[in-house]
Structure formats: C-alpha cells, structure tokens
Image: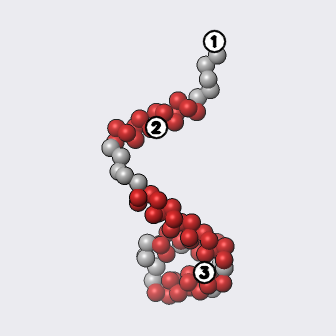
Amino acid sequence: MLSCKELVARSSDYLDGQLTLGEKLLARQHLLFCKNCRRFIKQLRLTQATIQALPEAPVDDVDEIVQRITRAQQPPKTP
C-alpha cells in the first residue's frame, strides 16, 4: 500500500488518469483506508473544477491583474 507521501506525489497523475493499472489500484487501496488523503483528493478535484469553470481571460486582462496585485503589495506612500 502507498504511504500518504507517495499518494500526494502521484495525485496529479491519479486525477489525470496517467497511472498504470497497478499504480491506480495501489492509490485506490490507500484512499479506501485514509480519510485524510480522500479529503485531499476531493479538494484537488474541486480546485480543478473551479479552474475549469473560470472563463478564459485575454492576455491583456492577465497583465492588468498582475499589475494590480503588484501595486496592492507595495507599501502605501507616505507624504
């Protein structure tokens, strides 16, 4: 059976369906017994679904968002 650390390391491949049959069975066996890893995989699936539901932003919008974040992180100017 996989350890939690091994499952986390392979979690992306597990969710993307890129594991061999044997690896997939080991991952499922671990998930059967480990509620923390089940919760972790559930959170990853939710994150994937949320990202997929976001509209695609034009490149200009992404640049604007980065600039806003950069400005927000700068300390306020004092007179």
Q: Secondary structure at mark 3?
A: helix
Q: Position of residue 54 (x, y in %)?
A: 41, 54
Which residue was labeled with disc 3? 31
Please tell me which residue is depicted at 61% across the width and 19% down the height of the picture. 77
Q: Quadrant of the N terminus?
A: bottom right
Location of residue 59 in the rendering, given as x and y in whole percent from the top left corner: 34, 42
Residue type highlighted by circle 1? Pro
Disc 1 from disc 2: Cα separation: 26 Å
- Point out the tag, 1 or 2, that comes first from the N-terminus: 2
Which labelled disc corresponds to residue 26?
Answer: none
Residue 57 is left or right of residue 76, and the answer is left
- Label located before the other in sequence (1 or 3): 3
Label 1 neighbourhood size at 10 Å, few (<14), some (14-19), many (20+)? Answer: few
Q: Is residue 72 above or below residue 45?
A: above
Residue identifier under label 1: 79
Q: Is residue 47 above or below residue 68?
A: below
Task: Residue 2: tell me if it is visible.
Answer: yes
Work out how far the residue at label 1 is from the one at label 3, CA to CA, in angstroms: 57 Å
**Between 30 and 52, which is closer to the camera in this rendering?**
52
Q: Which residue is mark 2?
A: 66
Question: Mark 2: which amino acid?
Answer: Val
Question: Could you tell me residue 20's position as x and y percent?
Answer: 45, 83
Element class at badge 1: loop
